[in-house]
Image (cartoon, grey):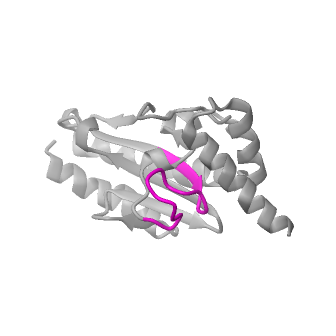
Amino acid sequence: MQSEEFHSLFTTEFAEPLIEHGFQTIGRGSSIHHVDGTRELLILRQGGRLARHGVARSVICFRHTFLRPIESDDPTKNPIYVEDCPRKLTFDDFDGWFRPSLNYRPENSGRWRIHDINYAELGAAKLKSQLKKLRSTILKRVLPWTQTLTEESELSQIKRFGENTWCEQRWIEDYENFLSRLAS
């Protein structure tokens, strides 16, 4: 399968149906996000130095909207990149029957797991099926999981499982500032 055909199927079988559920495209539409209150779920397609011919690469990311991006003090700066999100996950993290109980996992400094779809080796029917399954995972598993992530729980997770990196220190500061404003 060629790149153009993949992007067409990605749009019709994955992105557009998720837009009907409140997602919005980011940039030219390869990446999408969903904002609910202070919770932001992003499905970010990876390109640039991470690109591979015939392979679509993506990361599921979660952040609270008040967290400052790595390269800015403005939490509303766009676009948001993988590095700007404390939670970096793949679709495999949501496999299984039970509700995922995912602890924060430090994946900073350009080191994170990526979900690959090797579309060059897939036919259209197989790819459609795979994209529908991924879309279902987002709607039935990932979005409900994000609703369990409170500001307090994320702060606790980063403090408990973090590596004390500078980005984690920044996120801790942002969470503490947000929670102190709520308490006032």
Relative side of 15 to 123, left or right: right
Q: Residue at x 37, y 45 (%)?
A: 129
Number of marks in picture: 0
The residue at 58%/53% (across/down) is 63
Q: The N terminus appears in which quarter of the rendering?
A: top left
Tell me where residue 35 sits by quadrant. bottom right
Rendered view: 142 above or below 112: below
Does 82 sit left or right of 54 as displayed?
right
* 82 in relation to 31, above or below: above
x and y percentages locating residue 138 in the rendered image: 53, 51
In the rendering, at what x and y percent does residue 139 appear? 56, 55
Residue 80 pos. (x, y %): 44, 57
Q: Nearer the viewer, residue 124 or 68?
A: 68
* Quadrant in which residue 38 is drawn: bottom right
Query: Residue 120 lies in what quarter of the image?
Result: top left
Camera-nearest residue between 135 and 24: 24
At a point 69% along the width and 30% down the height, the residue shown is: 161
Q: Is residue 135 visible?
A: yes
Identify which residue, 34 or 27, lies in the foreground. 27
Residue 84 rendering spot, x and y as whole percentages: 49, 50
Residue at 48% of width from left, 54% of height from top?
Answer: 42
Q: Is residue 62 magenta?
A: yes
Left or right, 119 with respect to 138, comes to: left
Left or right of 98 on screen, residue 10? left
Question: What's the magenta bit mostly, secondary-structure-wise?
Answer: loop
Quadrant showing the C terminus: bottom right
Asked whether the viewer can see residue 150, the reply is no
Question: Does residue 9 belong to the magenta stretch?
Answer: no
Give the vertical position of 72 relative to 160 (above or below): below
Highlighted magenta segment, given as a residue range: 60-77
